[in-house]
Image: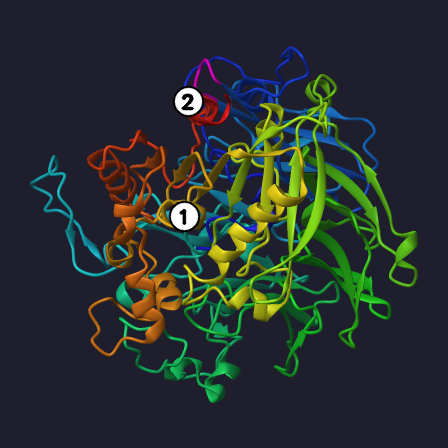
């Protein structure tokens, strides 16, 4: 379930949609909150501005960026645009009205395009001279301007009735849905529309649907945006990402491709597969790992995820992120380079035994063809790579970098950075591949400085421990502010989601380590088996073994902390986690042997047989479990998975547990949380259920977010603070 929590967006996943409209005329801006005793509170966390997308002007002199502000009182968000010089000077707030303004981009070096009320507008760099340049009736959901400034790709939803039939017109009030195939709902909504990319001529207003007549989505659900499309440098072609499947075929597959659309002819060609390619027939109730689609002779046809194309500055190449195997969302993200003249494909960064999470082209082909970010040993840093595939690490911060944007000079990069103790801000990087030690980084935004200046920070350190299979595991220890090593502190074991999501230096507005430490807790956060950043073998050992080595790793980490960190109060331990982390909590509840005094599970899987048929992305369960539970010939891994489902060990539960779930969570359906809570209460175990009728796999609304934090800490304080 890696698509739920990824490294690149760990700091921003809790934002509202970027084009969210205000629900009243109350303006929301930067909040001057006062913090008492230097202690982070839920209210302080929600008062922080959240930096979103950003873009550099063509001449590299300026950057436009987006900030989201949230009102707990009004229970909504407001998004604004700001502009500054590339070095951080000359900051200006461009959005002065009540409507959110988002998706800042550059029409030219003096003109900013942006989205408001579902239309594209332009303005000067000081916010003046506003003009509406699209007229779609408020239908624009995202856009990308062509390099020549004459056209734009716009994302717009169209009706989709491939799997949910349209109701009869004479029954306009009917609420029923006639479902005929799988993928009838995705993430948090029923699939009755899909996005298509249209080419908008900014002069005539004429729009052309790139996928005219095709029942597919572009960009891909549930998180794809305009980064999944790109213009050629001459504005004559568009590269786009698409998984051209529907129904059951869509639900079991991760096979998306890069397509090239020619504006002059209207023709499209697939850059990943030969013309006439037909995918092998697959059994939808079994993992694709050993089926024909992943046979060695078919891997050359790019059967896995291929996405996020970028044309080279000279227009001769397209690069994109590419996973090798179909059905495996957490396969290694490779960097694929396609030569347009010859059709040759090369995979770079293969010597980097982790994922390429984001990249940008360089204009220095000799020393650095690309710059990219990737996680290694639990931090997300900057690397360079040349044509020979030689990788150099350019930064070594105990922090995570987010997406990269090359400035117009081709030499400097704007990147977002965050850590356990720092919310996201923008930084200006000047990479030096010849001498990485001379790579410079300069912070250029200080969005929440007025809040952080009032806060006392905790400390963060790494520890390594030998696992039960004789390997080395890194785990983070986060200590409270004003830490006193002579005292005892209640301690939390953090169980990560994914399951293949790194425990790197993320900043979250829910699972926030700074606020946990500020409330007086030590946090132990293991990089257990199954996480990227420690090699492919380490990452892949979890598939088919959810309750084996990774669970022993959790106990190894907390046992090591109890034995070797005298400030850890071993008599007051809790275990917490979400998604796969919630599953981990439910499993540990039946196997912890009295270690923990309380548990918290958010959106966790409880009954894996039910989970198999409840979840919408079947490819995930197939890859992780191997087989449907009803298959009589299921593998040993599959049998072990179902035999060790947490619900089978409720008879061993003996510890208070808080279960949290969203009713709009279609990835892990809310019956999982209710089942765990009901089981605990029927066993006579103290338990609470926090259920959100209007939240999905995350908690997005401000008042729900505050309720989540208060409930979370009330539960921990009740059981862990004597």
The magenta segment is 72-76
In this view of the protein, which residue sits in the foreground, 493 or 74? 493
The residue furthest bottom is 297
| Left or right of residue 8: residue 63 | right
Residue at image location 82% in from the left, 56% down from the top: 394
Q: Is residue 74 magenta?
A: yes
In this view of the protein, which residue sits in the foreground, 439 or 265? 439
Q: Quadrant of residue 654?
A: top left
Residue at image location 28% in from the left, 62% down from the top: 643
Q: Is residue 160 visible?
A: no
**Residue 584 at what x, y percent from top left?**
42, 49
**Residue 103 at what x, y percent from top left?**
58, 39
C-alpha span from label 1 to label 2: 26 Å
Q: Is residue 26 magenta?
A: no
**Residue 46 at what x, y percent from top left?**
55, 23
From what the image shows, is residue 665 above or below residue 125?
Answer: below
From what the image shows, is residue 515 above or below residue 549?
Answer: above
Residue at image location 26% in from the left, 68% down from the top: 628
Mark 1 and mark 2 lie on one chain; the one further toward the N terminus is: 1
Query: Which one is closest to the eye, mark 1 or mark 2?
Result: 1
In this view of the protein, which residue sits in the foreground, 149 or 675? 675
Q: Which residue is mark 2?
A: 707
Q: What's the magenta bit mostly, secondary-structure-wise?
A: loop
Under circle 2, the secondary element is helix
CB atoms of marks 1 and 2 within 8 Å: no
| Left or right of residue 179: residue 82 | right
In this view of the protein, which residue sits in the foreground, 41 or 162? 41
Q: Which residue is mark 1?
A: 588
Under circle 1, the secondary element is helix
**Residue 345 at what x, y percent from top left?**
63, 79
- Quadrant in which the N terminus is drawn: bottom left
From what the image shows, is residue 405 above or below residue 517?
Answer: below
């Amino acid at each position: 379930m890696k698509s739920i929590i990824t490294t690149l967006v760990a700091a921003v996943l809790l934002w509202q949609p970027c084009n969210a409209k205000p629900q009243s005329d109350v303006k929301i801006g930067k909040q001057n909150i006062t913090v008492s005793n230097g202690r982070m509170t839920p209210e302080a966390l929600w008062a922080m501005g959240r930096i979103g997308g950003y873009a550099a002007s063509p001449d590299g002199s300026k950057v436009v960026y987006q900030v989201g502000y949230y009102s707990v009182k009004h229970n909504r968000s407001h998004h604004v645009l700001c502009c500054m010089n590339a070095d951080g000077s000359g900051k200006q707030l461009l959005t002065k009205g009540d409507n959110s303004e988002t998706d800042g981009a550059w029409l030219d070096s003096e003109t900013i395009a942006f989205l408001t009320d579902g239309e594209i507008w332009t303005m000067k760099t000081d916010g003046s001279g506003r003009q509406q340049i699209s007229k779609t009736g408020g239908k624009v959901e995202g856009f990308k301007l062509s390099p020549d400034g004459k056209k734009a790709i716009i994302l717009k939803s169209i009706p989709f009735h491939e799997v949910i039939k349209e109701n009869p017109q004479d029954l306009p009030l009917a609420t029923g849905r006639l479902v005929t195939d799988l993928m009838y709902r995705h993430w948090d909504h029923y699939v009755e529309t899909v996005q298509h990319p249209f080419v908008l001529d900014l002069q005539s207003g004429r729009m052309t649907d790139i996928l005219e007549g095709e029942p597919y989505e572009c960009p891909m659900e549930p998180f794809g945006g305009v980064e999944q499309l790109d213009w050629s440098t001459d504005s004559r072609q568009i590269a786009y990402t698409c998984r051209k499947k529907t129904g059951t075929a869509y639900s079991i597959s991760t096979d998306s491709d890069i397509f090239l659309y020619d504006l002059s002819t209207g023709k499209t060609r697939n850059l990943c597969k030969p013309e006439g390619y037909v995918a092998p027939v697959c059994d939808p109730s079994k993992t694709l790992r050993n089926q024909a689609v992943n046979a060695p002779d078919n891997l050359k046809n790019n059967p896995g995820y291929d996405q996020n194309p970028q044309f080279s500055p000279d227009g001769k190449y397209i690069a994109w992120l590419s996973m090798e195997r179909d059905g495996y969302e957490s396969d290694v993200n490779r960097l694929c380079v396609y030569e347009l003249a010859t059709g040759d494909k090369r995979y770079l960064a293969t010597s980097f035994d982790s994922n390429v999470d984001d990249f940008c082209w360089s204009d220095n082909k000799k020393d650095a063809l690309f710059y990219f970010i990737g996680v290694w040993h639990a931090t997300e840093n900057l690397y360079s790579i040349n044509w020979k595939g030689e990788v150099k690490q350019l930064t070594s911060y105990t922090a995570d970098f987010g997406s990269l944007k090359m400035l117009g000079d081709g030499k400097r990069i704007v990147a977002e950075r965050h850590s356990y103790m720092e919310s996201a801000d923008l930084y200006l990087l000047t990479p030096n591949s010849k001498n990485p030690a001379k790579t410079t980084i300069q912070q250029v935004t200080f969005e929440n400085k007025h809040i952080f200046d009032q806060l006392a920070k905790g400390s963060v350190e790494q520890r390594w421990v030998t696992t039960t299979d004789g390997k080395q595991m890194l785990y983070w220890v986060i200590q409270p502010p004003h830490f006193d090593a002579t005292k005892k502190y209640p301690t939390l074991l953090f169980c990560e989601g994914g399951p293949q999501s790194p425990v790197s230096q993320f900043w979250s507005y829910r699972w926030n380590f700074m606020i946990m430490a500020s409330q007086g807790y030590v946090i132990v956060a293991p990089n257990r088996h199954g996480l990227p950043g420690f090699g492919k073998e380490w990452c892949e050992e979890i598939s088919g073994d959810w309750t084996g080595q990774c669970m022993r790793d959790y106990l190894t980490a907390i046992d090591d902390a109890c034995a070797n960190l005298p400030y850890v109060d071993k008599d007051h331990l809790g275990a917490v986690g979400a998604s796969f982390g919630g599953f981990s909590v439910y499993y540990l509840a039946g196997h912890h042997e009295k270690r923990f005094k309380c548990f918290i599970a958010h959106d966790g899987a409880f009954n894996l047989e039910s989970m198999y048929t409840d979840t919408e992305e079947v490819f995930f369960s197939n890859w992780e479990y191997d087989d449907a539970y009803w298959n009589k010939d299921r593998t040993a891994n599959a049998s072990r998975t179902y035999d060790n489902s947490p619900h089978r060990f409720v008879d061993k539960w003996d510890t208070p547990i808080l279960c949290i779930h969203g009713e709009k969570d279609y990835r892990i359906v809310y019956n999982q949380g209710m089942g765990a809570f009901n089981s605990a209460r029927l066993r006579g175990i103290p338990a609470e259920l926090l259920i959100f009728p209007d939240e999905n796999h995350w908690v997005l609304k401000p008042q729900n977010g505050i309720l989540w934090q208060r409930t979370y800490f009330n539960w921990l304080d009740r059981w862990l603070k004597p």
